Image (tube, helix red, strand yellow):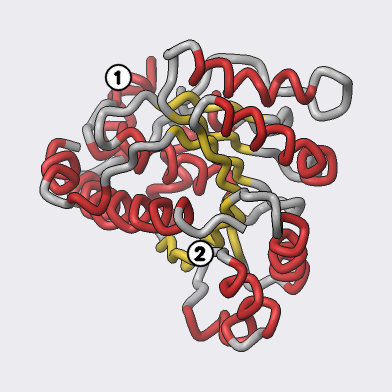
Amino acid sequence: MSKVNSLLQRTDHNVISAHIYIVVVEGKGGVGKSFTSMTFHHALSADGSRVAVLETDTTNSTMYSVGLTSGDPISTRDETMLGGLLEGVALIADGEADHIVLDAGARDEAFLMPHLTKLAQRLRQIGGHLVVVRPLTTSHFVLSNAAECANLLEGTGISLIYSLGLWGGRTLKDYQGWMDSPYREAALAAGAVEIEVRSIGTVVADNMVGFGLSIVDVADRNFGKAGENEAVARKVFTRPMVLHCNEWLDEHVIRVRAGLIEALGRPL
């Protein structure tokens, strides 16, 4: 990550001064929410910032599996949910974290969205900003949800980022219907920002989670986190894979940070 840090130091427009609370959400499963959360975590922490990770996904708990969080998932089915979300605000206010990334589980969107306005208000009181990130696929339902989210957030002062997933065989051509959609045009006009997240590779992604490693762990060859499977992990993640992860991080850290800075200047 030293290369990424040196890139950031030479790129003034990638400096993020505000405290950011990112909520990665989409009601459908299998759209890459956890991978997107990891990507934004790594982008925010690349300059040395302390990024705390929360999750509501009680089924997969991917953030826990890869060692990015040690706490219990936030319950979205009882009265403690808002308190769980505000824990992230408290971590920033108490100086324990600079930024927060929340990985929301599938089917949690309906429970989560009504609390976002209150969460944004509390963040503004401590100089923070709420950013909703929606991973996109070519699914009609995912794209419809993305368009509806922009309508729901308009006038709230919350920023919205669409993370266009170019993985699983998807190309920009596959998103042509979305690109030409008046709903996308309206969302971008209202302040939404769109970024592209490219595939890190199926073999890398599958084994990364399987061994309990993050993208940075693979890039830095931190295979000790695999525990008793360390030796196997070192064999599976070949030198070309490690170099590929470093290049992927270089590209996406700069891209995501630039998208965040744009989104902070264009709240809905």
Identify the image quadrant of residue 265.
Answer: bottom left
Q: Circle 1 is placed at which residue position?
A: 224
Percent from the top left, x then y, of residue 44? Answer: 36, 38
Q: Are marks 1 and 2 in contact (CB under 8 Å)?
A: no
- Most extreme residue toward the right is 78
Question: How many dots with numbers?
Answer: 2
Q: CA distance from mark 1 to mark 2?
A: 37 Å
Residue placed at 48% from the left, 37% from the top? 20
Number of residues whose C-alpha sits closer than 10 Å to that of mark 2, classed few (under 14), some (14–19) or many (20 or more): many
Percent from the top left, x then y, of residue 29? Answer: 71, 51
Identity, as a three-letter code, of the amino acid under mark 2: Val
Percent from the top left, x then y, of residue 253? Answer: 31, 49
Identity, as a three-letter code, of the amino acid under mark 1: Gly
- Most extreme residue toward the front is 125
Percent from the top left, x then y, of residue 235? Answer: 26, 36
Whether residue 8 can be seen here: yes
User: In the shown orientation, is residue 231 left or right of residue 140?
Assistant: left
**Nearer to me, 129 or 246:** 129
Quadrant of the snapshot with the N terminus: top left
User: In the shown orientation, is residue 12 left or right of residue 134?
Assistant: left
Q: Dot 2 lies on which element?
A: strand
Q: Earlier in the sequence, mark 1 or mark 2?
A: 2
Whether residue 165 can be seen here: no
Which of labels 1 and 2 is toward the front?
2
Q: Circle 2 is placed at which residue position?
A: 193
**Nearer to me, 227 or 128:** 128
Quadrant of the snapshot with the C terminus: bottom right
Placement of 238 over or under 160, stated as above or below? above
Residue placed at 11% from the left, 49% from the top? 10
